[in-house]
Amino acid sequence: EDGHDLPPEVHHPLDLPRRPGDDYLSLRRLMMSRRPALYFSPTPDIPPFFPMPAVNTIHDLIPVFFRPRFPSAYQALPNLAQTKFFAESADKVVTVSRTTRQDLVQRLGLAPSAFAIVSRGVSFLSPPAPWAAVKKKYALDAPYFVVSGNDFPHKNIDGFIRSLRHLEPALRRRLLLVFAGRISPRLLPVRARFVSDLPDGDWITLLTHARALVHPSLYE
């Protein structure tokens, strides 16, 4: 999205809201004035009757799959009809895996050729932070497990927490969990740390020294 490797004569980042589709009229006016050869959106949103070739991105169908069970959690995200409209409006849809392309073909009824698979890359990360500093900063006074996720229901954080109650009391007393991500603090039957917006260097060191990474997600 940052366009580090694209020359400026072919790459023009736009100062738009996080979801470009939030202001279709302004976006259309901007495109008409700049007349780019191609518009790329890192989200599914594309305005109707867009005036030039467009490529959008559909990372997954999580809002479609989980909206029936958790309607309030996903109501602000595109539903199946909206997702299909955006896909049909694009000249090409970028998606991140064969699994997601298969989901899109089956649920939207579009041809596989409508989609291009572009795997996610790795950001340029900072060097690892010193272990002694990270250990002190996050009060890591025992061997720990990192739990990664957020508060969306499909991440299954609450399901994982419920499972902790089945552990033997002696094990629960020894266990230390580090919840990393935008996870709201909860009452737990074990010791825990809740950390968010981790610097890259801290995150690398935190993972390196963990006993394991816990990823209880139901779907990615």
Image (cartoon, rainbow, N blue to C red):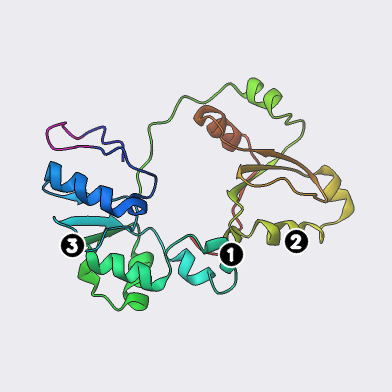
Residue 36 part of the magenta segment:
no
Task: Say whether residue 52 is left or right of residue 109.
Answer: left
Task: Say whether residue 92 is left or right of residue 202.
Answer: left
In the displayed structure, would residue 11 be above or below residue 155? above
Name which quarter of the figure residue 193 lies in: top right
145 or 101, nearer to the observer: 101
Does the rendering let one see residue 204? yes
Residue marked by disc 2: 163
Q: Mark 1, residues whose alpha carbon is within 10 Å: few (<14), some, or many (≥20)?
A: few
Q: Position of residue 182 (x, y in %)?
A: 60, 44
Q: CA distance from mark 1 to mark 3?
A: 32 Å
The residue segment tinted magenta is: 6-12
183 or 24, nearer to the observer: 24
Look at the numbered disc 3 and give the secondary structure of its residue: loop
Discs 2, 3 touching: Cβ within 8 Å: no
Look at the numbered disc 1 and give the secondary structure of its residue: helix
Task: Say whether residue 23 is left or right of residue 195.
Answer: left
